Image (cartoon, helix red, strand yellow):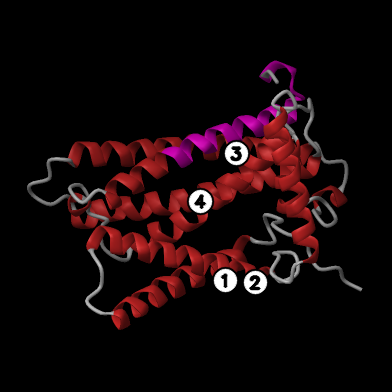
Amino acid sequence: MRRGRREPVTGTVLDAANATFVAVICFGLLTGISTQLQTVGPQAPWDVDPYDAVASFATMIVPIVAALTGVRYLRWRHEVAYPSFALVEIVRGCAVALFAVAATDTAYLVAVLRRGFPTPAPFRPELAGLLGLSVVTVALAAWRSAGAWSSQRRSRRGPDDITLSGQPDAVDDVAELLRSAPANLAPLHGLCVRAADLLVAWAGSSALSPRRHPWLFVAAVSFGAGVAAAASEFVHEGLPPSVGVGILVVALFGGIVATGGLIGYALVGRYLHLVHSPRRA
């Protein structure tokens, strides 16, 4: 739907989301190039802790939050006016993602001021440019998001509009986005609808679903991501000298990422309305 046909508050929030997605992409380029390319990484002043630790935690949080915000952005894409709860969720997602990006940019700037670039550093202009681009885009996105936050707050009719209790959670959002797949692509549409039905059924009945045991689900998924990171490390650096060392490395990676995932969920899980809150008597 074209921007001009949107309800004003909805348009303002979506503009903020678009700016946030641009900032996230620039953040991904900065962290990806400066940490994953072996020829570039040693030239980055922030390639040591505590600066790298800040970026590592942010890179666990930002992609997930941005993806969830994107799902909520796309779920209601055919509507002239988004529901008020959806606008709140989108603005909150933007705020969390931008905070993590800004924290990383700040840590990187401190690293540049305190450590400086090594000599020689052939990629110094590129690294400085990527950092500057990330700082500029996150500042612009924060400005747009602040305006969107004020706009959607003024549009509320009363204090009850702020609660997300009883509203669709992330599972519902993903399922509805799947169901909205283009109907003219019959095979794809049918596959997406079946996947949505399976997702909803699994979330409502499985003991491993995020709705029934969210902490266990987050820990399991995060640990799996840590195992994948360890496997990637083995591919790039070679196999460990022994099976015991390999198991220790896998357990270490899995434990670190699982801990980070649990901390992230504790900080922003309820704020972002990832799953339905338990009902209180």
* Residue 73 place in picture, x, y as percent: 67, 37
Q: Main secondary structure of the magenta part?
A: helix
Q: Which residue is mark 1?
A: 219
Number of the front mark, 4 or 3: 4
Magenta stretch encompasses residue 19: yes
The structure residue drawn at horizontal position 67% and vertical position 20%, both measured from the top left corner, is 3
Q: CA distance from mark 4 to mark 2?
A: 19 Å
Write the start and end of the magenta stretch as one range: 3-25
Q: Are marks 4 and 2 in contact (CB under 8 Å)?
A: no
The kind of residue on which mark 3 rests is Ser
Tell me which amino acid carries mark 1: Ala
Q: Quadrant of the N terminus?
A: top right
Location of residue 174 in the rendering, given as x and y in whole percent from the top left corner: 70, 46
Q: Quadrant of the C terminus?
A: bottom right
Q: Which residue is mark 2?
A: 215
Side of 6 relative to 31 (left or right): right
Residue closer to the observer: 235 or 12 = 235
Q: Which residue is mark 4?
A: 62
Q: Residue 145: which disc?
A: 3
In the rendered view, tell whether residue 207 sits above or below residue 37. Answer: below
Q: In 3D space, how far apart are the residues under numbered discs 4 and 3 (Cα atoms)?
A: 16 Å
Task: Identify the amino acid type marked 4.
Answer: Val
